[in-house]
Image: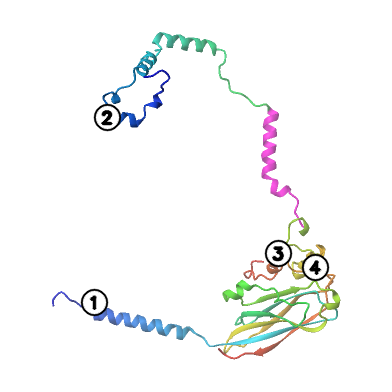
């Protein structure tokens, strides 16, 4: 093998030509492979025991002890859980249709009807009936709920 | 040829014929003669009407609403709101009809005007008890109106 030759120079084509040297590796490559073929380091049982003993000495003072949360942390956690559970009752009811609750008694007549759709449209300054949510509101007003469900 | 046998045994053929005969006769027996009618709904108000809503029922529970069309006023050019799904499904034994207009008061209807026509299907021999309820009628600024509601029935023909 010429100096500077890399293993990549020995492609499949050169190996398939059928010449007598085609099946043998170059000598330089063989020498490099032999040089890297060293015995693996072995950890003996003695070394293993010494490492274990050193680790035990190192961590002897770090015995696991159950941690106790302070009382205030427990109270705070209980308060958070309580607030989460009571959230539906603590949130203010959105009665204003402009705040997002659309199907409400806008005009304060005591019932939800087409006059509420008109009042909502007027409140928004609408000039036409193109608004999809107003259309949905009107359709809900005339929806035939099963008898006894309302 | 001993390998050939009748496909259907005569006894089974007789049963099949009876089932077919029953299935052909059953729809004819279930089909009840019906008739159609149109109810012109009118509203009479002393001031321009910007929104109205009524409910139509049949005390005899014989009515089935099959369609609703708009009225005469140009301020309400489209068909009014009603439960189209229930009508299309054939389950509208009552109907709530409503509409509103954002036109200026000068263009809103006042006095007596037809606001809608409700088309109903009835059993041919039924005597319906139509009940019309005015839910609301308001002015353009939302004031309730002291309005009157009525209807006139136009009898249709049997299909």
Rendered image: mark on residue B68? none
Query: Do the dots labelled 3 and 1 sit on one chain?
Result: no
Distance from disc 3 to disc 1, alpha carbons, whole Å, reads 63 Å
**Residue shown at the point (71%, 67%) measured from the top left:** A135
Label 3: element kind: helix
Task: Confirm whether residue B29 shows in the render.
Answer: yes
Residue A74 forms part of the magenta stretch: yes
Residue A57 lies, with reference to residue B73, above or below; the image says above
**Counting residues from the N terminus, which is met first, the one under dot 4 or under dot 3?**
4
Q: Closer to the N terminus: mark 2 or mark 3? A: 2
| Mark 4 vs 2, N-terminal side | 2
Which residue is label 2 attached to? A18
Q: Nearer the viewer, mark 2 or mark 1?
A: 2
Measured from the top left, where is residue A86 in percent x and y? 69, 45
**Nearer mark to the viewer, of 2 and 3:** 2
Question: Please, what secondary structure does the residue beneath circle 4 have?
Answer: loop
Reply above or below: A41 against A10: above
Residue occupied by mark 3: A132
User: In the image, what residue occupies the spot 15% across and 74% down?
Assistant: B3
Query: Quadrant of the image for the C terminus of chain B?
Result: bottom right
What number is the disc on residue A127?
4
Instruction: Give x and y (percent) for residue B52.
Output: 76, 75
């Amino acid at each position: 093998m010429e100096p500077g030759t890399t293993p990549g120079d020995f492609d499949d084509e050169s190996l398939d030509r059928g010449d007598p040297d085609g099946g043998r590796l170059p000598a330089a490559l063989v020498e490099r492979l032999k040089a890297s073929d060293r015995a693996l380091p072995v950890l003996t049982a003695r070394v293993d025991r010494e490492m274990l003993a050193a680790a035990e000495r190192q961590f002897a003072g770090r015995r696991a002890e159950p941690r106790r949360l302070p009382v205030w942390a427990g109270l705070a956690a209980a308060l958070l859980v309580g607030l989460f559970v009571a959230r539906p009752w603590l949130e203010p009811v959105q009665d204003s249709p402009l705040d997002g609750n659309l199907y409400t008694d806008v005009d304060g007549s005591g019932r939800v009807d087409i006059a509420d759709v008109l009042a909502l449209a007027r409140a928004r300054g609408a000039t036409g009936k193109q608004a999809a949510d107003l259309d949905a509101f009107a359709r809900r007003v005339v929806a035939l709920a099963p008898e006894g469900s309302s | 040829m001993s390998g050939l046998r009748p496909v259907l045994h005569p006894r089974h053929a007789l049963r099949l014929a009876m089932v077919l005969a029953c299935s052909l006769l059953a729809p004819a027996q279930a089909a009840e003669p019906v008739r159609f009618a149109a109810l012109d709904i009118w509203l009479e108000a002393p001031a321009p009407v910007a929104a109205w809503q009524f409910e139509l029922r049949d005390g005899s529970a014989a009515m089935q609403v099959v369609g609703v069309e708009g009225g005469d006023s140009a301020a309400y050019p489209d068909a009014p709101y009603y439960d189209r799904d229930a009508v299309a499904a054939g389950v509208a034994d009552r109907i709530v009809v409503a509409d509103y207009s954002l036109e200026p008061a000068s263009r809103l209807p006042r006095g007596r005007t037809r606001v809608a026509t409700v088309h109903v299907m009835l059993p041919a021999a039924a005597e319906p008890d139509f009940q019309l309820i005015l839910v609301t009628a308001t002015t353009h600024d939302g004031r309730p109106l002291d309005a009157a509601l009525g209807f006139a029935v136009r009898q249709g023909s049997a299909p």
